Amino acid sequence: MTEHANTAQRDVHAQQSFAALDPDRVIDAVESLGFVSDLRVFPLNSYENRVYQFGLEEAEPLVVKFYRPQRWSAEQILEEHHFTQQLHDADIPVIPPWQNQDGQSLFEHAGYRFALYPRRGGHAPALDDMENLFQLGRLFGRLHLLGETSDYRHRPTLSPASFGESSRDFLLENDFIPPSLREAYQSLSRDLLALISQRYDEIGARNIRCHGDGHVGNILWRGGDTYLVDFDDSRMAPAIQDLWMFLSGENDARQKALMELVEGYEEFRPFEPRELGLIEALRGLRIMHHAAWLARRWGDPAFPRAFPWFNTERYWGEHILMLREQLALLQEPPLQLHY
């Protein structure tokens, strides 16, 4: 049995056990830390983990996050917690997990690992407002300035191998690609990964501790306050990984947004222009990784309900078209800074 087939079996086992997490277990887990529930437990929007708003007697609700079994090791989770605490201590607006009097932030109950967070509300920023982009640039400039002071020892690195090759291998070895499209996927994904790897080698960007999933869904704005949330995908990566998803629309709009982001960013940390050449490479890796992520989680009952269009012939045909478009975009000139 191949390594990817073994991984698929472990994922199915983890997903089946995850599906058994019910409100009673959630209450028991949180109350094991000394909190008293008011019996109001509401699931929040999360597929990779299980996240709940947890009501407390005579206190503000908490957010409790149960980690997907077998995804991260305890060491990897604690590295994420340590990074967010470092950022918080430096007055960077993130939300670190609650710690008990012994300084513990990761807990276990009935085989489930979990963490607690204070609840914060807010909405996503409007990216057509240039001031918002300027402030986002400042936020990530501060984050990266601290992030580059040390490396993760246990959490992974975003690379063509980890996001691209492993995704391609998993899909092909577990027969997700329909036979009618298999040859097209094999050849196209091979060519795309070769070009992405070439771009990585040419640019030679430095990897630093990043948020890893910088997009509007992970920004909370409310009443003048800004919070960057959900560091679950935090890893070593080029700094541009935290910025490129804020650039959308036609080329002129993306160019204008880039200048605002960089202006704010450079108030705290120099921006490396050569990393702009990685944007389409990173987009291609994200497309491949997302398809494989859905495939790896398909045994979790929450995924077929949420993504009923996945794993159809139409889906894979559109996926191959996206990869073909990405191959073409990689051969076009990248965005440029115009000071």
Image (cartoon, rainbow, N blue to C red):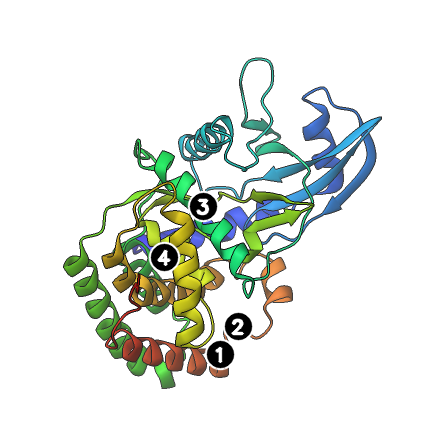
205 up-or-down from 329: above or below = above
Kindly identify the residue that appears in the image at 41 percent across and 75 percent down.
252
Q: Nearer the viewer, mark 1 or mark 3?
A: 3
Dot 3 lies on which element? Answer: helix
Kindly identify the residue that appears in the image at 53 percent across and 72 percent down.
310
Point out the image quarter for the C terminus.
bottom left
Location of residue 199 in the rendering, given as x and y in whole percent from the top left corner: 20, 64
Relative depth, front residue between 58 and 297: 58
275 up-or-down from 32: above or below = below
Whole-number angstrom distance, CA of label 3 to CA of label 4: 43 Å
Relative depth, front residue between 30 and 158: 158
Whole-number angstrom distance, CA of label 2 to CA of label 1: 6 Å
Q: Local crowd at mark 2 within 10 Å, few (<14), some, or many (≥20)?
A: some
Residue 255 in sight in this render: yes
The residue indicated by pointer 4 is 5
112 up-or-down from 170: above or below = above
Location of residue 31 in the rendering, given as x and y in whole percent from the top left corner: 73, 25
Dot 1 lies on which element? Answer: helix
The residue indicated by pointer 2 is 310
Whole-number angstrom distance, CA of label 3 to CA of label 2: 37 Å
The residue indicated by pointer 1 is 315
First in sequence, mark 3 or 2: give its number. 3
- Residue type, mark 1 in image: Tyr
The residue indicated by pointer 3 is 138
